Image: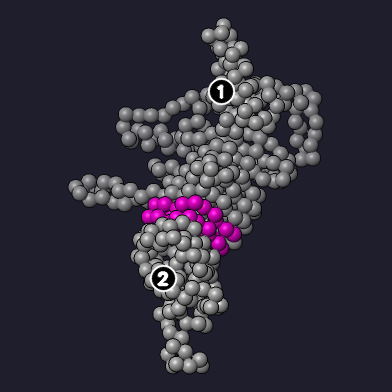
């Protein structure tokens, strides 16, 4: 078997590579074809091989699967081993049986993610490119590709297990975490570079159910973020007694930005800068710079502002959706109800805490219209200026 040697010392067999037929090959179209070209290629072959037209039914099934795969970004069809693994559908008559079998699936997928990490790390060390499928249909199948620029592309839903990568990650799919156990919790770590969803708002990508994303030295550009909180019957069987369980979804980017749409129901965010639309239902955020563009902040939201930081609420036609019971917490321990900030007018603040005060409408409140609220202003919110106190400017 003849092959060529790359810089990392590995042998890639030309014979083997030629035997691996991509989904593009199956549809007889060029790699990187547009959605229309993929659809036209499928229709052309479907007319030729459909059983109603006297064609080969097995070939038609193969063509249809290739078309479905390309629609979700999968370049290669399943291998025989993957088909065998994915054919296992775990179900059961009782919740206990379902949990037991789901635990097995979580364990298998976690092993797959460990293999995926080792595979991606090996390519990273040798600065090589490659594409490979991981996961299972039951919990989620993903195509990973290490690109020439060092970025790792992930296509598909990440449902369980951990993955660490020393470089940027670009993802097309959702991120979730198992409900039945913390053991196989979804954790993605990016030690260098950004984590980005591809057009997250348009594609409605989400991170939910207690998954955790850690970006050490970059930004996190994501879509909607959801946690989960629910009540379960008391394990000791006491009637009418329930315990609250939560799957808190966490995004951490201590040195960078988190850019998201909505954070809803049991979510924690921490970064240098957080840019968000709305914050609803037990959301905790901590940052030096916080920019809120939407019109909803609920009563159980806590905004922690780092020393020297700023907050801006850009909503300029109504602030009714900003609950007065939401809290702003400073690093020195001081807590301020959002009500106090909503009702405080710019003219009521000491001049020394509002630079260029003359440039603002003094009857405007601090919330809305993009007015910058500084840490210093919040720290001194209940203080009066020397001028107001003594009638003179010293």
Which quadrant of the structure image shows residue 299?
A: bottom left
Q: Is residue 99 left or right of residue 186?
A: left
Q: Looking at the picture, how far across and down is residue 138, in whole percent?
A: 47, 31
Q: Is residue 44 left or right of residue 393?
A: right
**Is residue 263 highlighted in magenta?**
yes
Q: Is residue 36 left or right of residue 351?
A: right
Element marked by disc 1:
helix
Q: Is residue 270 visible?
A: no
Element marked by disc 2:
helix
Q: Are marks 1 and 2 in contact (CB under 8 Å)?
A: no
Q: Along the polypeptide, which appears first: circle 1 or circle 2?
A: 1
Q: Looking at the picture, how far across and down is residue 389, in whole percent?
A: 42, 90
Residue range corresponding to the magenta coloring? 256-282
Q: Is residue 65 above or below residue 104?
A: above
Which quadrant of the structure image shows residue 338?
A: bottom left
Residue at image position (44%, 35%) is: 104
Q: Residue 341 — which label?
A: 2
**Is residue 369 highlighted in magenta?**
no
Residue closest to the eye, 123 or 208:
208
Residue closest to the eye, 34 or 79:
34
Category of crowding for the residue at label 2, using alpha-carbon neighbours closer than 10 angstroms: few (below 14), some (14–19), many (at least 20)? some
Give the total of numbered labels: 2
Report the residue marked by disc 1: 65
């Amino acid at each position: 078997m003849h092959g060529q040697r790359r810089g990392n010392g590995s042998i890639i067999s030309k014979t083997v590579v030629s035997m691996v037929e991509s989904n593009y090959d199956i549809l007889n179209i060029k790699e990187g074809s547009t959605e229309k070209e993929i659809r036209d290629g499928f229709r052309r072959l479907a007319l030729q091989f459909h059983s109603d037209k006297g064609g080969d039914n097995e070939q038609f099934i193969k063509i249809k699967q290739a078309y479905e795969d390309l629609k979700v970004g999968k370049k290669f069809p399943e291998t025989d081993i993957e088909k065998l693994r994915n054919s296992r559908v775990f179900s059961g008559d009782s919740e206990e049986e379902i949990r037991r079998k789901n635990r097995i699936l979580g364990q298998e997928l976690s092993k797959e993610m460990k293999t995926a990490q080792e595979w991606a790390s090996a390519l990273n060390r040798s600065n090589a490119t490659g594409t490979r499928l991981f996961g299972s249909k039951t919990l989620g199948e993903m195509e990973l590709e290490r690109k020439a620029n060092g970025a790792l592309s992930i296509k598909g839903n990440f449902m369980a297990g951990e993955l660490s990568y020393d470089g940027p990650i670009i993802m097309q799919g959702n991120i979730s975490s198992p409900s039945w156990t913390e053991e196989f919790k979804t954790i993605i770590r990016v030690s260098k570079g950004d984590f980005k969803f591809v057009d997250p708002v348009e594609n409605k990508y989400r991170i939910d159910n207690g998954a955790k994303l850690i970006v050490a030295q970059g930004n996190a550009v994501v879509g909607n973020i959801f946690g989960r909180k629910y009540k379960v019957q008391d394990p000791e069987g006491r009637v009418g007694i329930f315990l609250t369980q939560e799957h808190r979804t966490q995004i951490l980017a201590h040195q960078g930005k988190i850019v998201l749409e909505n954070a809803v129901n049991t979510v924690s965010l921490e970064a240098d800068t957080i840019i968000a639309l709305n914050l609803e239902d037990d959301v905790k955020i901590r940052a030096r710079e916080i920019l809120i563009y939407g019109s909803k902040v609920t009563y159980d939201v806590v905004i922690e502002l780092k020393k020297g930081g700023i907050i801006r609420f850009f909503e300029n036609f109504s602030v009714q959706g900003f609950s007065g019971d939401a809290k702003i917490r400073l690093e020195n321990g001081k807590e301020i109800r959002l009500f106090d900030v909503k009702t405080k007018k710019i003219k009521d603040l000491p001049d020394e805490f509002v630079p260029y005060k003359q440039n603002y409408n003094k009857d405007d409140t601090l919330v809305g219209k993009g007015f910058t609220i500084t840490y210093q202003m919040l720290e001194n919110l209940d203080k009066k200026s020397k001028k107001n106190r003594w009638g003179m400017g010293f």
